[in-house]
Image (cartoon, rainbow, N blue to C red):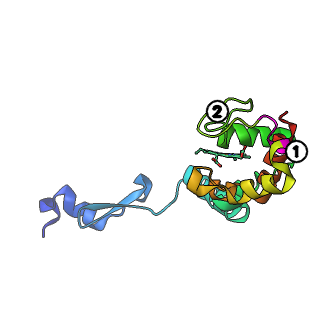
């Protein structure tokens, strides 16, 4: 091929354009594989975050377990009562779905109260507290609260 017949494309084929930051191979511009600084910084930050996350991450279970153990107090029991029992029981003598629980401790006595809380009366519509997903500590707290109901 005569020099004067070469198209600019042909010349590119041969001549690298180092000054332009790329060279052309068979008419395709090939960039120099230089990673820009900001991308390097991004990679490093992401890698650091990944390591940090890997070390500090906890499972969902660990996070929910961290809520307990609950305090075994009448106050804690009141909150549990309002969340799990108040739909069926008033703390007065008023009957809702179940009997009002005013004076329930005097009425039932220690043993029967424990029995009702742990075993319920399933045939009569009173669920056992463990079946409401209450832990032993939560049951103790509810029991302390019920004792305060006169
Ligand atoms: C779905 C309704 C329902 C829920 C929820 C419920 N109860 Fe009951 N409960 C009843 C019924 C109905 C009875 C009466 C059973 C019977 O006739 O012997 C009862 C009975 C009782 C008794 C015995 C009362 C008595 O005078 O003999 C106690 C104590 C009691 N429930 C406590 C609780 C506590 C504490 C909770 C919450 C953790 C709770 N209940 C949640 C329906 C419920």
Q: Is residue 58 above or below residue 38?
A: below
Which residue is denoted by mark 2 in the rendering? 95
Secondary structure at badge 1 equals loop
Mark 1 is surrounded, within 10 Å at the Cα level, by few (under 14), some (14 to 19) or many (20 or more) other residues, namely some
Rounded to the nearest angstrom, the CA distance separating label 1 from label 2 is: 26 Å
Q: Quadrant of the C terminus?
A: top right
**Range of magenta residues:** 102-106
Q: Along the line of sight, which residue is nearer the eye, 79 or 95?
A: 95
In the rendered view, tell whether residue 57 sits above or below residue 147.
below
Tell me if I can see residue 97 in this picture: yes
Is residue 58 among what the camera can see? Answer: no
Q: Residue at x 36, y 63 (%)?
A: 16
Q: Which residue corresponds to the image point at 73% horizontal and 59% vertical from the top-left?
A: 118
Queried whether the magenta region covers residue 125, the answer comes back as no
> In terms of secondary structure, where does tag 2 sit?
loop
Query: In the image shown, does 20 or 65 lie closer to the viewer?
Result: 65
Position of residue 9 in the picture relative to residue 76 (left or right): left
Say which of 1 and 99 sits in front: 99
Q: Nearer the viewer, mark 1 or mark 2?
A: 2
Q: Are marks 1 and 2 in contact (CB under 8 Å)?
A: no
Picture coordinates of residue 97, whole percent (x, y) = 58, 38
Image quarter of residue 51: bottom right
* Residue at the limit of the structure toward the bottom, as seen here: 1
Across and down, in percent, residue 109 comes to 85, 50
Q: Quadrant of the N terminus?
A: bottom left
> Residue 61, which numbered label?
none
Classify 47 as above or below 147: below
Between 102 and 45, the residue placed more toward the observer is 102
Residue 73 has which mark?
A: 1
Residue 123: x and y in percent read: 57, 56
């Amino acid at each position: 091929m005569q020099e004067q017949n070469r198209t600019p494309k042909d010349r590119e084929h041969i001549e690298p354009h180092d000054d332009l930051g790329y060279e052309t191979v068979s008419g395709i511009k090939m960039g120099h594989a230089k990673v820009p600084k900001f991308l390097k910084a991004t990679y490093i930050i992401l890698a650091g975050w990944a390591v940090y996350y890997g070390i500090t991450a906890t499972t969902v279970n660990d996070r929910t377990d961290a809520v307990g153990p609950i305090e075994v107090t009448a106050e804690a029991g009141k909150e549990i009562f309002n969340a799990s029992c108040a739909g069926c029981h008033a703390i007065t003598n008023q009957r809702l779905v179940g009997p009002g629980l005013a004076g329930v401790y005097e009425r039932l006595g220690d043993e029967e109260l424990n029995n009702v809380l742990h075993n319920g009366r399933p045939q009569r519509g009173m669920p056992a507290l463990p079946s409401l997903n209450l832990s032993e500590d939560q049951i103790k707290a509810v029991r302390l609260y019920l004792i305060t109901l006169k």
